[in-house]
Amino acid sequence: MVKNDRSSYGHYREAVYARLNRYTFALDSPDDRMVAIIARAELPRYVRYWVTLLAKHEATTSGKCPTCSRWWRAVFAPCGTWKWAHAFLTIAPARTTVPSSRTDDGVPARAGSDPVGCYVTPKPY
């Protein structure tokens, strides 16, 4: 890695984690309005991203992915991008636990019942 790339990486990393921390704070907040505001602002952008990304990986009439295939190696549909998108968007739910700050009845959660907001991780195949 070139020195300039390390500096850029640090800025990218800081910005991405700041955004993810903002989302985590909103999800753990007892105020659902904050979640709704972020969802209304961010969800359209994420949907546009997914649609654009997946359109680039649509199979040709010969069944090959035009983005992943190279002149020396054909990659047939579904390519890795489609497999990853499918797993991410359809197989595992985004979250299976109530945010650590509350429960279904609105009562604050017990200490230690959900220490880190326990997000789902995909199961290995």
Image (tube, rainbow, N blue to C red):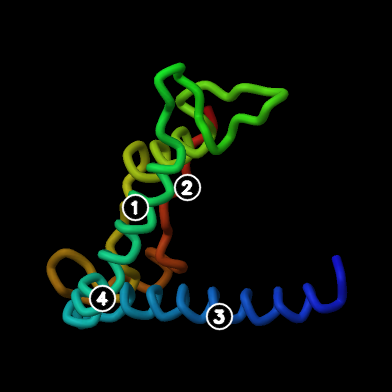
| Res. 121 mark | 2
Foreground label between 4 and 2: 4
The residue that mark 1 highlights is 94
Q: Give the residue at x 50% y 23%.
A: 64
Q: Nearer the viewer, residue 23 or 41?
A: 41
* Structural distance between the alpha carbons of marks 1 and 3: 22 Å
The answer to which image quadrant residue 63 occupies is top left
Judge left or right: residue 101 versus residue 121.
left
**Kind of residue indicated by mark 1:** Ala
**Kind of residue indicated by mark 3:** Ala
Classed neighbour count for the residue bearing mark 2: other residues with Cα under 10 Å, few (<14), some (14–19), many (≥20): few
The residue that mark 4 highlights is 41
* Structural distance between the alpha carbons of marks 4 and 2: 25 Å
Q: Position of residue 55 (x, y in %)?
A: 38, 42
Q: Callout 2: helix, strand or loop?
A: loop
Q: Position of residue 112 (x, y in %)?
A: 43, 69
Q: Give the residue at x 42% y 42%.
A: 85
Q: Earlier in the sequence, mark 1 or mark 3?
A: 3
Q: Nearer the viewer, residue 59 or 1?
A: 59
| Res. 15 mark | 3
Foreground label between 1 and 3: 3
Foreground label between 4 and 1: 4
Q: Earlier in the sequence, mark 4 or mark 2?
A: 4
Are discs 1 and 2 less than 8 Å apart at CB? Answer: no
Can you say whether 56 is above or below 5 in the image? above
Q: Earlier in the sequence, mark 1 or mark 2?
A: 1
The answer to which image quadrant residue 32 occupies is bottom left
**Kind of residue indicated by mark 2:** Thr
**Kind of residue indicated by mark 4:** Ala
Q: Earlier in the sequence, mark 3 or mark 2?
A: 3
Q: Position of residue 9 (x, y in %)?
A: 70, 74
Classed neighbour count for the residue bearing mark 1: other residues with Cα under 10 Å, few (<14), some (14–19), many (≥20): few
